[in-house]
Amino acid sequence: MHADKFVIPAEAASATKLETDVEVLRAQAGLYAFLGRCLESEVDQALLVALRGPLRDTLAELGIDIGEDLRSGAPKEVLADLGEEFAALFVVPGAVLPYRSAYETGRLFQPQADLATAAYRDAGFDFRNILSGEFPDHVAVMLAFVGRLLERQAEALEAGNTDAAAEWQRRREHFLLHQIGGWAVGWSRRAQSCARHPFYLAVLGLAEQVIWADIGDIADEKTLKRLVKSNRRPLVKQKTDHAFRKASGF
Amino acid sequence: MGHIGNIKTNRRGFLKLGATASAVGATLASTRLVAMEQELGGADFSAVTGEKRTAVPYTCMACNIEDGGVAMVENGRIVKLEGNMDHPNTRGKLCAKGNAGFLHVYDPDRIMSPLLRTGKRGEGKWKRISYDEATSLLSEKLRAVIDRSRAANDPSILNETVIKWGRNRTGGGIDRFMHALGSNAMLNHTNICESSKKVGLEPSWGPDIESCDWENTKYILNFGSNILESAYFMNPNAQRLVDGVVDNKAKIVSFDVRMSNTAGYSHEWFAPYPGTDSAIALAMAHVIMTEGLHDAEFIRDWTNVTEAQLLAHLAPFTPEFAEQESGVPAKDIRRIAREFATTKPATTFSYRGPCKHLWGAYQEAAIHMLNVITGNIEKRGGYCLPRGMGWPQPSPNPPKGPVPSIIAAPPLYPLASHHVSTNAPYMIMRGEAKVSVWMYYYDNPVYSYPSSHVWNAFLRDESLVPFSVAFSCFMSESTELADLIIPDVTYLERHDPESMPSGLFPCLSIRQPVIKPLGGTQEFRQSLIDIIHKVDPDGALGARKYFEFDSVEDWMRQHFDSIPGLKEEGGWDHMKKVGVWPTYGTVSKDNGKLIDDNGEVVVAEYGLHAAEIPAATMASAVVEPDGSITKDGATIGVQIDGKNHTGFGTPSRRIELYKESFRKYGFNPLPVYKRLPSRDKKPGEMILTTFKVNVHTQSRTASLKYLAEIYHKNPAWISPARAKALGIADGDLVRITSAVGYMVTRAHLTEGIHPEVVAISTACGHSAYGRLATLKHKEADAEWALGGDPDITNNVWWDDKGVHPNPIIRLSLDPIGGSQAWYDTVVTVSPAQPGDKYGDTKVSVEASMKDYDEALRYAYTGDLHRAAHQEVDVDWNALPRPGH
């Protein structure tokens, strides 16, 4: 798997209809940006304010429970608890690492990271880490990237440039199918099974649904079957050969 | 006879034609068909693109042998490691551990970000912080110790800043750091390793280890060393040992309680009773001296004893006495002694087997003496001095702290020149020393120390250790107890100067980042710079000036750019390209030996001790009555038969078989055998020993997939006869009980073990160190079962991680070398009891504290020491006061 293979082939042009509703695009961009922010780093004061303010009612209307303490607890304690949960879920050894490389290969920073970087750069973005141990194939960065592509599509439409809008949509769909679709849903499910705080349960559940819904819109049946299998990562346990084990060890 | 056309052929005719064609040589060789391996290392190609991979030299640190390596890098990613063909001692080869080492870099359980504890110690609750925040926090703690010391005008407070390491290959970096802080409280791990070997050797001839010329020897006596698998300099020694045995037809005889792969490779293997090696060695010396097989001239010229003294001293150590103690037949001891003395050249080698006992230093000294009395010292094919090289420290270099640290140099162990780190928690728990900041680097005592539960209790206790910091990139059993983790990078991502005496060719080598530190992680050396800059931001404390480096690489340049010879070849820049200096030759594609430009095998230099002192140096030097040569107050050599030699690294410049430093503290100045308490165990009891295997280090490799798949469980080796008597069958659950507790494991029945011994390997049975080492995914906990590694989740076919023996091993110390007596723990072995489960371990801190008290009774001020050394000519009422 090499980054230079990321170049989107011409035939990869979107088979879906061009989304021209700018409001829809901006709403989708906001949703992806929200998911990206929640999963990219610990909840900080600004995000807490947003969750308690503008987002509170909407989340409640959607039936998304972010936890009573987050809604009304003492900010210092809430942020500390969420920081601890973030570290346990995504950072410390034993965590459900949010990297495509780790999910697919069991190793950090494999060519999957190069593919993500190539996609970002091809679209005029780049990745930088703020803290150590952050890689370009982080699920949150990928989701945020989808959000940025949606924004660009909306901007192109507002500028009356339909061709450019189509190109942004093509990039987004290709990225969703080829870099997110095969693992992020399965990863979200795994992370939910480990999450203890309602906020992360909610965000991970939302991520799973959003990603899968969008992929369902753009993937054909065959592709969907492949992605379902890929996300499930079925157990391919090797047979235990006791005779071999006896001969090779004790 | 057959016919092809008009040509008459038969087998003889074919062979004749073939021989003629062969003689014509290269002219008839195909120019199209080439060997797949055109070059012996150093070049590699991408399997996908065919492009040449970037080759970056480095020095391995999977274990402590420091082999030369080359990393193959593709797209900024390490894809393969191999040996560096320019390294004269490891000659392009890495062991299994070295080949697997790059898995550390991409390990999903690697700590990639500084972590600050948020829950109770060991609870596993953390907050992610930045390196800047982490180094600032530690700096505040360190500065507080300094400020308190200044306010109280008590420099001893500075020693409350402690650092302990398992592996320190910083080339003086940690010393610089600690001395800049005014602390001498540095603890290495050497007393759980081979420190009594070192103390058995150093006062005798200077260095702490030997470098055997395996390749050119004819006879090897191996005492308790598993050279082919794990001993010090395993890879280079193993290569040369095989060269010696196969090419040079050397004979090897091994003494080991367990049939290791080295013992199995030997021409003869004897399994002596544990801790009786020196009885055997002294009996051999007895035979050699009494039968006149010794090198009288060497003893006269190069030692501080006479033949008569030796004969008198060795008189009681007969082969029959050795047989009684060791179980090795006297006739074999006699025969092997004669073979060893009359086969030239010959050498011994020993490692942890003999020295990891009470009075282990005596054992090493006795084995060493065999080489001395047979004159095999510094001979081609003999027992040689180690060859290493040094490098200058950047200037200015801080002086030591103002006050000695009593945990770094316990006063009751004045001869233990390599620390007594096992005692630190006991001393602090007893109030003998105090800690404010405890830092640990590459260190995992909660797993790797005897009675490891004591370290667990110690590091958990905030009243004993108010603040602890781990510089680790893996969540070990010890790291998980830290308050703050400032992750180091792996050895493939950082800088170090190196020189290991792993062969007969002295050389320098380096460690350099073969890739950029992964994910923005920061190497330890940079953290040290940052911390000192924060402790002393304006330089007013006087610490900052020792860390005025523009970068870590600038630090390295200051080590290497001024070394004569290397400087002319480019200094640090040369090291970055080649990885090692000097270059002695190339590795022959035919036989793997080091050859020069003419194809001749490069021969090492021998007789280092006999090198003559230049006349210019002798100007104004004084030859003392005993022959030692002094100049400006220092001994620079020894005069023998009118010639001025540099000699050995001892006060007399001769080999000091008689050690006055030992006598001063009531120890026997000559090598002796002391019957161990474990020799007098009760019938039915056994002795527990541990061992390493060829694919693992003590504690750091259980997380490497390539290695864990090969070896991951460690049943207890028991002899079939003993097992039968105990009612134990192969694979049965057994309970092994020592004075501090018990463990439940499985039995492995084998004839390859002394019937009085039960042996369990290290490297298994982790409770931490990542999901592979612990096999947590086999448990129900979703947090682990669903973790980030599908390879582990899906493909780890084994469900047995082993059981770690260290908790039940008692603290016991060699009072001379200060070394942990790993192989003296007396145990009972029985079938598991009802309710016992595999892996159960129950141990007592209180019982271990009693072991500490018992150990001190053997220290030079103790009653048991005096009782065991009545033969020593010393005024027992006038022994030096501790600390003086």
Image (tube, coloured by chain):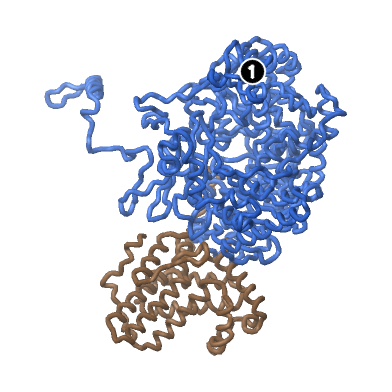
Chain colours: A brown, B blue
Q: Where is residue B83 shown, x and y percent of the image?
A: 44, 40
Within 10 Å of disc 1 (Cα), the crowding (few <14, some 14-19, many 20+) is some
Q: Where is residue B167 shown, x and y percent of the image?
A: 60, 45
Based on the displayed image, in which of its 4 quarters is residue B262 positioned?
Answer: top right
Report if residue A173 is visible in the image.
Answer: yes
Specify the quadrant that holds the N terminus of chain B: top left
Which residue extends farthest left?
A: B6
Between residue B329 and residue A79, name the one nearer to us: A79
Q: Give the amino acid type for the residue marked by disc 1 in the picture.
A: Val
On what subunit does the disc labeled 1 rest? Answer: B
Between residue B873 and residue B615, name the one nearer to us: B615
Q: Is residue B661 above or below residue B521?
A: above
Report if residue B751 is visible in the image.
Answer: no
Q: Where is residue B239 shown, x and y percent of the image?
A: 48, 32
Q: Residue at x 62, y 69 (%)?
A: A84
Q: In the displayed structure, does residue B426 sit left or right of residue A90?
A: right
Q: Residue at x 65, y 65 (%)?
A: B125
Specify the quadrant that holds the C terminus of chain B: top right
Between residue B358 and residue B53, name the one nearer to us: B53
Q: Is residue B618 above or below residue A39?
A: above
Q: In the displayed structure, does residue B385 sit left or right of residue A114?
A: right
Which residue extends farthest right?
A: B877
The residue that mark 1 highlights is: B622
Helix, strand or loop for disc 1: strand
